[in-house]
Image: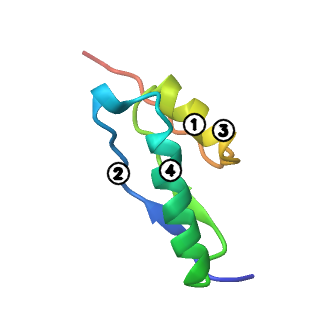
Amino acid sequence: MGSAPAFVFNVEVDESQRGRGNGRAIMTVGEDYARQQGVVAMAQNLFVQDDVARSLYDKLGYRVTNVNMQKELI
């Protein structure tokens, strides 16, 4: 069923440059490059509750495939 997904480890846009489409541009370039290499899927983890990043990935067509939960015991 194709190759393993390309995995996005870290995308960071300077706070002063956020909200200008830079995150979308970074992801789009990465997706295009991966597609040219024959990769059929992209995956990533969001390790913190980041509503802005989550909204971007939702708009780009990413979907939740796994949910991890944790409870602090301190």
Cβ atoms at labels 3 and 2 below 8 Å apart:
no
First in sequence: mark 3 or mark 2?
2
Provide the residue designation for mark 1: 56
First in sequence: mark 4 or mark 3?
4
Looking at the image, residue 70 lies above or below residue 66: above
Q: Nearer the viewer, mark 4 or mark 3?
A: 4
Where does the image place residue 48, in percent across and percent down from the top left?
40, 31
First in sequence: mark 2 or mark 1?
2
Which numbered marker is on residue 10?
2
- Residue at horizontal 67%, vertical 38%? 59
Element assignment for label 2? loop
Residue 44 visible to the viewer: no
Residue farthest to the front, as pictured:
20
Which numbered marker is on residue 5?
none
Provide the residue designation for mark 3: 58
How far is mark 1 from mark 3, CA to CA? Answer: 5 Å
Q: Amino acid at mark 4?
A: Ala
How far is mark 2 from mark 4, CA to CA? Answer: 14 Å
Element assignment for label 4? helix
Q: Are there few (<14), some (14-19), or many (20+) residues within 10 Å of tag 3?
A: few
- Which of 26 and 5 lies nearest the eye of the viewer? 26
Q: Nearer the viewer, mark 1 or mark 4?
A: 4
Provide the residue designation for mark 4: 25
